[in-house]
Image (spheres, grey):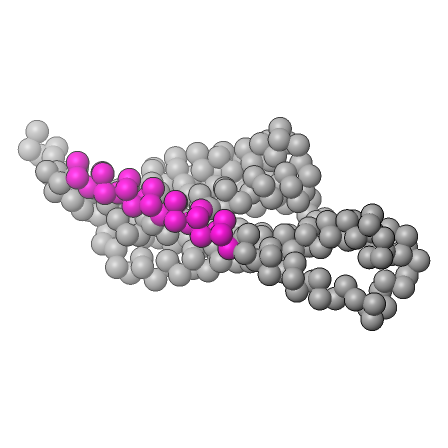
Amino acid sequence: MLYSFSPSASYLSSLALMTPYLQKLMNYPVLTAGIVMGPRGLGTMLCMFLAGRSIGRVDTRWLLLMGLLLSALSMELMTGWTPDVSMKAIIYTGFMHGASLGFLFEPLSAMAFTTLPAALRGDGTGLYNLSRNIGSSVGISICTVLLAQNIQINHADIVGYVTIFNHAFRAVAVQSELNPLMAGGRAALDALIIEQASWIAYMNDFRLLMILSLGATPLILLLRKPAIRTETKVISEKA
């Protein structure tokens, strides 16, 4: 049950981050943001089907490893996003991250319930769903708090370079648009600083989720391989 905490925290936290990321930083309309995030669900659906068909034929722990590595890889790609990132790259990365969910929750459910006695599977279902809900809630809360905190910290750091000694403000284009001595220039400059601080804060959150996915990888060694085919054979013989 504890193992389902990390994937829930990683996957659902990224969903909570991507919506404001696309609408506020990428300036996507609501409909466009929804369409861009749609392939993520398609990747989850396809890989859940593939993982379900593979359970019993392939060691389930290999499926979990693939899911965690896909999640970490997609988060690593997100840390390299810039304001010039293409919509194609966002869709591709979202599909990859959605695929990681298909390789995680389906095998986790199989391993959680096939290793439990039938009399305990009802209690196991409640605990399993509880761990997933707690994981997603904790992950979203931590990422949201860190995002707001890092935006403030980055804003303070960048503002330290806005001084009369910075030669960049002597450029004609900067003086006409971002002159800190004028009210309009200060407002435009502050908006630019907030945008840059937000970009850095989002990259830090994506990096944290990548580390969380990689950190859960060694826990695979603690999982037992569910004997699905053996149980099926026993049930068929009793029937």
Above or below: residue 128 compared with residue 199 = above
State the residue in front, 31 or 235.
31
Total count of labels = 0
Q: Residue shown at 37%/58% (left/top)? A: 216
Residue 148's spot in the image, x, y percent?
A: 55, 52
12 left or right, relative to 113: right
101 left or right, relative to 167: left
Above or below: residue 146 compared with residue 105 = below
Q: Residue shown at 68%/52% (left/top)? A: 194
Residue 185's spot in the image, x, y percent?
A: 83, 51
Q: Residue furthest bottom?
A: 165
Residue 179's spot in the image, x, y percent?
A: 85, 56
Q: Residue shown at 51%/55% (left/top)? A: 146
Quarter of the image where one finds residue 55: top left
Q: Magenta span: helix, strand or loop, mainly?
A: helix
Residue 163 seen in the current view = yes
State the residue in front, 198 or 78.
198
Residue stretch rendered in magenta on the structure: 122-146
State the residue in front, 142 or 76.
142
Q: Quadrant of the C terminus?
A: top left
Q: Residue shown at 83%/71% (left/top)? A: 165
